[in-house]
Amino acid sequence: MKKIFFTGLFVVLSCFWFSAQLEVSAKPFMVGPDKCQKCHKAEHAVWKGTKHFKSFKKVHKNKKAKKIVKAIGEKRMKKAAVCANCHYTSVKKKATDKKAKLVAGPSCESCHGAASEWIGIHNNTKVDKAKRFADAKAAGMIWPTETFDVASNCMSCHGLANENLSGKHATAMLDNGHPFNPDFEYVEYSQGSVRHRFYAPKMTVNQEMTEKQKAEIYIIGQSAAMLSATQAITKTTHPAYVKGQKKRISNATAALNKIKAMVPEAGAFLSSPSKESGRALAKAVKGKDLTGAIGASLPKSYK
Ligand code: HEC
Ligand code: HEC
Ligand code: HEC
Ligand code: HEC
């Protein structure tokens, strides 16, 4: 009787153990840019020319970095999880690995989503495109066509809005000279060094956007910044932080007001900013010519 009980208990417990393991292994982790390079050589070459790439060997040596790290109670930037959230690509071999290895600054998966669960799905062109798209997305991929999500993702790092960053740490960072640029504008920052647009039919050419396309993503960038700021502003009452988040909101409000009459979704987003209303706005501006309303706001040069 006792033996049956214990065997039963063992079976039940191992079921829990196995399901816990499965849950862990379904959580996406980063595999690193070398894995992408094999098939995406042109994009990898562009990335190597960016500050995102160059930062890995540099930023921790910065005097300011040392001061900021100390202020959050750590010794080295490359060992501080707080900094890794935005500055590094932390790679694992398998989900159960306790330690992740820092292999680069912000890289492919910082912008396209941690790839462990989608790398083998997204490229399987034998599978129907809609299904492949949906499956990879469910596994954590941010497809370039999901423009609002792509822009929102930049904003979590560039707006000091990362969800894993506590108010206490944001305060200590700002008090010790960490930069915060509330005027990070999506067109200016995405169409310079970072741009990789090797689309068919001219797959070998890194294509520049037309003014019309720039105007479209200008609006998407502003709405993404606004949602990011709205969600982050309660993190801390630190005056510089609150002021910066308010600036992001006022920049976006001014931009969206310029197209409100043409695009009702802009008004809907302003009165209730959310992921859903942001995606609806991105869909509404797709293919529209907004250059008349906001052409003058487009940047003259790029980062
Ligand atoms: C074994 C080859 C291979 C590897 C490895 C690979 N990819 Fe891809 N990737 C592809 C192919 C093929 C496509 C095009 C699929 C299609 O036609 O829809 C693609 C498409 C993409 C797209 C969408 C392109 C578009 O036009 O919308 C992105 C983004 C992307 N890959 C990122 C990555 C990242 C990031 C990694 C590394 C984590 C990676 N890929 C690794 C082969 C690969
Ligand atoms: C929420 C994301 C985020 C976190 C967390 C974060 N940083 Fe940053 N950091 C950035 C961004 C974005 C920039 C670039 C800002 C700009 O130029 O507008 C930056 C810039 C810097 C710079 C200036 C680099 C230069 O080229 O002048 C230093 C130094 C720095 N960070 C150190 C740290 C340290 C140390 C930590 C950890 C305590 C940390 N950061 C945490 C996002 C972050
Ligand atoms: C700073 C964020 C960022 C990083 C880092 C980044 N991407 Fe992208 N990627 C984007 C954006 C934004 C687009 C959409 C471009 C467009 O459609 O205008 C894109 C588009 C793409 C595309 C489709 C267009 C093309 O060039 O074929 C592929 C494939 C891709 N990225 C792969 C990669 C790979 C591989 C890496 C790493 C070597 C990488 N990306 C790094 C943001 C990023
Ligand atoms: C994981 C966090 C993260 C994400 C996501 C991210 N960035 Fe960055 N980005 C940084 C950090 C950190 C720096 C500063 C690096 C340094 O100075 O050492 C930076 C720097 C840059 C720079 C260089 C700015 C300059 O003054 O030279 C550009 C341009 C840039 N990012 C554009 C983008 C765009 C566009 C996106 C989204 C498509 C994006 N980034 C997404 C973290 C991120």
Image (cartoon, rainbow, N blue to C red):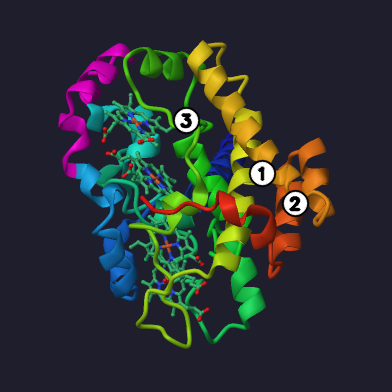
**Viewer-nearest of labels 1 and 3?**
1
Q: Residues within 10 Å of mark 3 (few under 14, many from 20)?
A: many
For label 1, the SS is helix
Residue 98 sits in quarter: top left
Q: Which residues are magenta?
A: 57-76
Q: Quadrant of the N terminus?
A: top right
- Residue drawn at point x = 83 percent, y = 51 percent: 261
State the CA–CA distance, disc 2 to disc 3: 27 Å
Reading the image, the residue beneath label 3 is 160
Q: Residues within 10 Å of mark 1 (few under 14, many from 20)?
A: some
In the displayed structure, 46 sits above or below 277; it is below
Reading the image, the residue beneath label 2 is 259
State the CA–CA distance, disc 1 to disc 3: 21 Å
In the displayed structure, 226 sits above or below 141; it is above
For label 2, the SS is loop
Residue 114 visible within the image: no
- Residue drawn at point x = 61 percent, y = 80 percent: 129
Residue type marked 3: Leu
Residue 75 painted magenta: yes
Q: Earlier in the sequence, mark 2 or mark 3?
A: 3
Query: From the Cβ of disc 3, is ligand 2 less than 8 Å away?
Result: yes
Q: In the rendered structure, find residue 255 and report the number of the disc placed on it.
A: 1
Residue type marked 1: Ala
- Where ligand 1 lies, by image quadrant? bottom left
Horizontal and vertical percent for residue 296?
58, 52
Horizontal and vertical percent for residue 231?
64, 30
Residue 106 painted magenta: no
In the displayed structure, 6 sits above or below 11; it is above
- Residue drawn at point x = 22 percent, y = 43 percent: 56
State the CA–CA distance, disc 1 to disc 2: 7 Å
